[in-house]
Structure formats: C-alpha cells, structure tokens
Image (cartoon, helix red, strand yellow):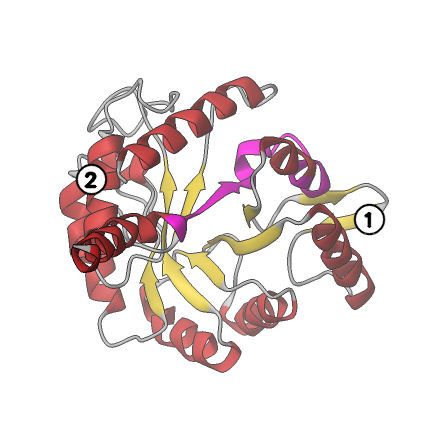
Amino acid sequence: MLKYILIAFLFLSLQGAGQKDWKLAIQTWTFHKYSFLESVDKADSLGIRYLEVYPGQQIGGTMPGVFSYQLKKEERDKIKQYLQYKKVKVIAIGVVDKYYYTRDKLNDFFEFASYMEIPFITAEPEWQDLDEFNRLAIKYNVKVALHCHPKPASHYWHPDSTIKAMQGRSHIGAWPDLGHWARNGVNLVEGLKKMKGKLWGMHYKDIREFDNVNAIDTIFGKGVCDLPTVMKEMKNQGFNGVVTLEYEVHEEDNMVDIRECILFYEKQRKLLK
C-alpha cells in the first residue's frame, strides 16, 4: 500500500513541477514613462524577480544613457550591483529589431547581454540577418527568441513565419506576443502548439477585440484571450520558460491594474496543479 501511495505522491508532484519553473517577468515597456531604475523598484514592489528590458530605456538616477551596449563598464557594474541588491534579474533584452540594431553593431548587443548575464535577446531580425543572429548566439551563449508585432509590418506576425525562421538554427527559438497574435487573428493555442520544443518565453497579454490590429490591452481575464486554456497548453508542453507580463494602457499609473493581472495569473497557475 505504501508503495502505491508513494507512486501517487510522485505523480502529483511531477504534475505541478513544470509550473514551478515558469518565470514571471515584466517587460519594462510597461513602465516606459519611467526609468530603468524606477522599473526595477516597481517590479520589486510587485514581488516580480525578472525583467525583460527594452534597449532604449533611460537608466535614471545619476546615470546617463539608456539600457544598451553603449553603457561603459563602470555603469554596467553599478547596474549589476543594484540588481543584485534588489534581487531582481534581467532575463531578456528586447525587442531588438531594425530600429535598434545594425549588422555592424549586432556583435555589441550580444557582448552586452553576455557581460550583463542576460540569457535571452528577444528580437525581430531581418530575414537576411537570421544566420548572423544564430552565429552570435552560439558565440556568446545568449539565445535569440523571435518576437512578433501586428501585421503587416512584422516579419513574424504569423506563427508559420517563426517556425520557418527557427529551422536549422539551434540558438533561435520563439517568444511570441499573445496580444499581437490575437490582434493578427491567430488562434493562440494552435500557435503555441507549433512552437513546442522551442517556446522559450512569451509576452502574456489580454486584449479587448480579436483580429483587430488596433485592439487595446485589458486586465487579464477581461478580454478575448483565453488565458486559462493557454496555460493548459503550456503545461501540456512542459513549458519551463519566461512569462513576460506586458501592459500597455494607463501608462502613467498602472500598478493597480498590474497587481490584478498578477493575481489572475497566479490563481490560474495554481488551478493547473
């Protein structure tokens, strides 16, 4: 009897094991009205330990410049010390697209990510630059995760484009934006199924209207994105990546809304166990 009890306990433990590895982050574009250092403080006050930082965010405080490769060693080290003090980790930098990188400066982005111990660059590379992104990802041991924006401007607005770009490139995976997928008329669960095995993260959102590129964000559970079903698919895949919360309304004062989003996420995550 004891043997069967232990087997049942192990089975139940494994059922919930995957979700324990999900890393809840905030994309600092959520706080783009504020500095990077202020974003760190906001994340800390929310109990969030991970950040995905967009590369144009002002550092703030007494430090000039933006969060990107132009930062000098002294400034980089100060940032690392502050993050360690706050117990917050930058898990990704992005979205790095044609507005932020040029081919001759791409190496600098990867060197910066490596120095700052950032494991992912979320990106929308130009088609002709995919191999170079993959080469540098291998060189610096920094993975590239393909993001998407609304059609038609984004190369990766449809999951099939992402699948094509990942093929044959070991260090390029997927980091879709659920809100943009829904804006583009993409079925979220079917899209995630296509990413299985290379789904390293996502921008986790809810929006007010499906198949409308101008639809605006809303609090989790109040829009058209079936987030509980999305979570079930994540569990079914054994997902163990990054769930990046991004919220693009009420930008001047969004902390109350974000707390409500976090509560929804945590409640739904616990229901999966």
Tell me the kind of residue under disc 2. Leu
Q: Which residue is mark 1?
A: 63
User: Residue 268, position in %: x, y?
Assistant: 31, 31
Q: Which residue is mark 2?
A: 188
CA gap between label 1 and label 2 equals 40 Å
Q: Which is more toward the observer, 179 or 7?
A: 7
Query: Which residue is depicted at the point 35% across and 58% down?
Result: 200
Report the span colored magenta.
20-40
The residue sitting at the front extreme is 1
Query: Which residue is depicted at the point 30% across and 48% down?
Result: 16
User: Residue 147, position in %: x, y?
Assistant: 36, 51
143 horizontally vs 64: left or right: left
Secondary structure beneath label 1: strand
Query: Which residue is depicted at the point 44% across and 43% down?
Result: 244
Point out the image quarter for the N terminus.
Answer: bottom left
Residue 16 visible at all: yes
Q: Is residue 42 above or below residue 50?
A: above
Q: Which is more toward the observer, 189 or 187?
A: 189
Q: Is residue 23 magenta?
A: yes
Tell me the kind of residue under disc 1. Met
* Image quadrant assignment for residue 146: bottom left
